[in-house]
Amino acid sequence: MIIQLENNIKTTDLERLRNSLDAVQYQCTEVNTQFQKYIIGVGKKEFDIRAIGTLPGIQDIHRVSDAYKLVSKKWRVDDSIVDLGNDVKIGTNHFQIMAGPCSIESEAQIESTLAHLLENNIKIMRGGVYKPRSSPYSFRGLGQEGLVLWAKKAKEVGIKIITEVMMTDQIDAMLPYVDIFQVGARNSQNFNLLDALGKVDKPVMLKRGISGTINELLQAAEYIFSNGNEKIMLCERGIRSYETAYRNTLDINAIPILKEKSHLPVIVDPSHGIGLRKHVTSVAMAGVIAGADAVIMEVHSNPAKAFSDGQQTLDYSESKRAFKGLIDCYQLRERL
Amino acid sequence: MIIQLENNIKTTDLERLRNSLDAVQYQCTEVNTQFQKYIIGVGKKEFDIRAIGTLPGIQDIHRVSDAYKLVSKKWRVDDSIVDLGNDVKIGTNHFQIMAGPCSIESEAQIESTLAHLLENNIKIMRGGVYKPRSSPYSFRGLGQEGLVLWAKKAKEVGIKIITEVMMTDQIDAMLPYVDIFQVGARNSQNFNLLDALGKVDKPVMLKRGISGTINELLQAAEYIFSNGNEKIMLCERGIRSYETAYRNTLDINAIPILKEKSHLPVIVDPSHGIGLRKHVTSVAMAGVIAGADAVIMEVHSNPAKAFSDGQQTLDYSESKRAFKGLIDCYQLRERL
Amino acid sequence: MIIQLENNIKTTDLERLRNSLDAVQYQCTEVNTQFQKYIIGVGKKEFDIRAIGTLPGIQDIHRVSDAYKLVSKKWRVDDSIVDLGNDVKIGTNHFQIMAGPCSIESEAQIESTLAHLLENNIKIMRGGVYKPRSSPYSFRGLGQEGLVLWAKKAKEVGIKIITEVMMTDQIDAMLPYVDIFQVGARNSQNFNLLDALGKVDKPVMLKRGISGTINELLQAAEYIFSNGNEKIMLCERGIRSYETAYRNTLDINAIPILKEKSHLPVIVDPSHGIGLRKHVTSVAMAGVIAGADAVIMEVHSNPAKAFSDGQQTLDYSESKRAFKGLIDCYQLRERL
Amino acid sequence: MIIQLENNIKTTDLERLRNSLDAVQYQCTEVNTQFQKYIIGVGKKEFDIRAIGTLPGIQDIHRVSDAYKLVSKKWRVDDSIVDLGNDVKIGTNHFQIMAGPCSIESEAQIESTLAHLLENNIKIMRGGVYKPRSSPYSFRGLGQEGLVLWAKKAKEVGIKIITEVMMTDQIDAMLPYVDIFQVGARNSQNFNLLDALGKVDKPVMLKRGISGTINELLQAAEYIFSNGNEKIMLCERGIRSYETAYRNTLDINAIPILKEKSHLPVIVDPSHGIGLRKHVTSVAMAGVIAGADAVIMEVHSNPAKAFSDGQQTLDYSESKRAFKGLIDCYQLRERL
């Protein structure tokens, strides 16, 4: 049960509400986001919610039977739009492409990528400065220093940036520089990291776990929302299956289902979703037709020389064609 | 190694070829399809194929390193088109929709469906007369009698039909009535059935196994081709995964990969691929954008009353919109 | 609902029973096995079964809520034992080992294997004469001729044989020679084959599908039983997963669960279950400790030279040690 | 390549070694554990390692082709034993059982569990004080306070404790109290946590990821070892599959394979591995027969009233029988 409170609810009214819920053995969690106050009540007893709905300071009240509550579309039927400022928005009717290298490598690489994005009217650049790597002996990214340089360059040309955060200790230093925090597939159930990202006022793009269920993804998003941050986006990036002809199995089904179940924007990552350069564009377009609000994809001036795995990375001429195809697909979907 | 023979190759020349291959310890399989003669040579030794290529009666010779040979795009770079007659073709640049009920139920249902397809300019009707059912106590379809009735009605209005064959003993009786034999997911490695379907001159649509790999699907198609039937289509219908939010995981990646690896037409089945009526159209369109040459989907005048599971079945007004969206997607893909 | 009938129930009494079930809209299936007569009633209405239970000719009546009925332990609480004759039995308290090559290759190989089994007091020999192969160009076994030779040799020394049947057309010819028909993983939902095997009086060992669920395996067994053959054994042979460090994922959990849900004997196939020769014995013993009533494993005098894949095949000295370990595990389990 | 150094290697000799490796373009990582110094060299060039092997200060040198190095059995052929003190050791020939509740709940529960373990001669108690929970609204454990209380009680009776650590910030506070840090399945690729646990001198039990591969598990262990901590144990706890008849698919195959590939102790968790109370003992025994060096299982005085999910938890009389069976299986395995 979600109880939306007036932001200026009186302490005594809040107390009365809590008492009413205690009386029916509901466990209460108070949620204060950058936008609003809520009480989440979890309990089993059936009772007449109208008795509560008429208390002062209460805006609205909704029963939500899902395991996740605040991220469910059952109470918020209008889709949420994540606003990055400067008129860059992501969500229903606000389509975006995020493109860039797997890893941030150098000043020259940053400049080259930004120029490519500007030329193609792309508003958001992706790139890794902290890289999760299977082996401890692999390159783990340029870290905070790379981020500061990148953020400066991107800001100069008005491009937003998204990058992965891997641990709570990195959040404070990264906060002034990133426009979107990315939570990677391996951290999709790192609940302490989710808690911490719920406490900042900055958009978070949450990737589905390597074998995460749709329910787990939504419950992970609930961690962020219930800690106070409503600016969340969900990312389908392929799941692990038995098939070895490609890297991951892009779960195209997840896209319309996430859009049905949640009010949050849904993003498709075709680069990891198939992992084969020559087919990235096909499945990216499929993701858009199926309902994705944004695409995040890997682009590099020379994929074969990329620091991290370039197997799934488009070069500039391939990505130029891809961007056009994605926009066409989005426009077709909007017309249908 | 595939050796394309002149159809009028002399017996002595064929003998000489076999001897040359024996000499390098290649195991030979002679393949005679409705279109051409081939020798498939399987062996390990490296040798100069030009020595064979210049023998009389030999048209061309190709090395194919894949486990499958005749269905590979490595030797036949022009995509195969399956021609059903009356200008109904399936394959690259020849897009089709196949629609109809899970099970054929009655004369009235057949007539209603045909009228719906005609109205929407759909050329192929799907329907089951032999139904594979998990439980022995479930309805298993109207059988041959239903097929004969259906085929007559469909022929009258110029619509082609596709239906599942479950055992070799059914082939002879079904042959005069069906336009396309369907091999279901549970029979995708029923090698005797595949052998038998390779011996008739009728198109076959082969579904990927419930957890079949892309390689297994292509090797299953190789069974049909190597027995003499080149008219084969491959169907992606979703794979089994751990996710329970839907019925199967439509493997969107498989579509561009099958088109890359094989010259055979590729068909997407969104009804089984997601199994949720409200999302069938979204993933069907995604399949088309990703490269499918045809869509096969379930349509019923009243899905809730369908004999077999109607959970994934569109009604007439939903399917009307879906057909339009699919055509739009196909046209967009052709333009890109 | 399972209604056990007296074998000599009068036609009129049977008619009366059917009418009673019709009256509550229950669909009836009459099952006549080599042992008994049953009526399976499937319907939704709740009614007092005592009204039926007291009709003449009725032995007992059981509600079974599972999707499968006759193979469920809910009505037959005493485990079924499959009796192969000559005091060779399989099931609870009757442990057996089945061993032999992947493929029957030659008279010498048959004789060598039989001698090895005799020496180790193994009562059942496995071997393939019809081999399901992914590629149409691979060796498909010696066929009926090989079976006849093998059966003769085995009978001479009193060893039972189990071999795979791949299509209904093979059953009649094989029937006089085999002691147990094996249904392979790829045919585990070949419903016509299951129907046909239900019509013979010969034990059948049914393998779980490549990605078959436990429920599907039990429903497949129900096909055989409901067609009239109660002599069924279930075989866990590993499932397909994402892990590539071995061939299949032996589902050890399935063993106690199958023993809980069904009264049928459960057999473990460690050779396919892990597919790595050096670990076959470890997982075979694990299977026995977990409750398997028998083990089926591949043994060859020279695995490296086996016709079919010998990667998972033990040689004679390895298998000698394995047999001993399996018996020790069985004895320990019986004591616990 | 692993180069084992003399612990008292001179700085100049270390420098000379580094230069030799630089000369062949090998990237070097210096590893200093609680036991020894190593240099890990990663490079592609083939060169004669004897030139390096004879340098002063070098004890031994090994080529290891696996993606993981220090945890591989290719260089350390004698299995590692983790010594918890007071003669409690885990590893080959040192079998242990770890038992206790999912969550630490109260002083009374701690005392009751310790008494039960003492009575059955179990040396290690498991329990959660920080619980990873899918939903942010669920109980997350008693935290540090619970740990301190529990550790005190356990120490009084000479029982070791193992508990999950979820974030780097918890390590310092937990360090004086825990005997084994557990890394949970959801954190198996939380590389920062693994780095941090590599910097303490305390045993770590690392669980396989929810859909982790065997290779990923070993590479995760490599993170810990390469940061300086050799006291690592690997835990198989079931993987995610399509089967829904139980909670996870215990991967019995992983046990002998991990013992083959690594010198680290291997532990089986049957509670999560099947998730069904009535079958926990069967699969636990299977794990021991297959080669596990220890079993970790859930035990509670009243599973139905356990704070966290008690579906997979044995009560005291069930666990008493299980302990006995496990010891019997271990003894049988040792004899074989």
Image (tube, coloured by chain):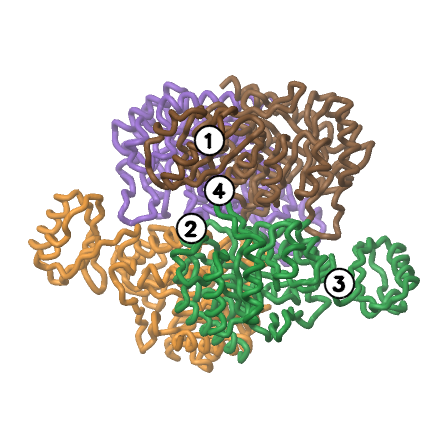
Chain colours: A brown, B purple, C orange, D green
Residue receiving disc 2: D244
Whether tag 2 and tag 1 are in contact, CB under 8 A, the answer is no
The alpha-carbon separation of the residues under discs 4 and 2 comes to: 25 Å
Indicate the position of residue C22 as horizontal and vertical percent values.
Answer: 14, 44
The alpha-carbon separation of the residues under discs 1 and 3 comes to: 55 Å
Indicate the position of residue D82 as horizontal and vertical percent values.
Answer: 64, 69
Image-based side of B94 in relation to C164, left or right: right
Residue receiving disc 4: D137
Whether residue B226 appears in this view of the structure is: no
Q: Chain of mark 1?
A: A
Residue receiving disc 3: D33
Q: Chain of mark 2?
A: D
**Which amino acid does the dot numbered 3 rest on?**
Thr
User: Along the line of sight, which residue is nearer the eye, D94 or C161?
Assistant: D94
Q: Do dots 2 and 3 share one subunit?
A: yes
**Which amino acid does the dot numbered 4 rest on?**
Tyr
SS at circle 3: loop
User: Along the line of sight, which residue is nearer the eye, B80 or A204?
Assistant: A204
Q: Earlier in the sequence, mark 4 or mark 2?
A: 4
**Mark 2 or mark 1, whichever is nearer to me:** 1
Image-based side of B308 in relation to A235, left or right: left
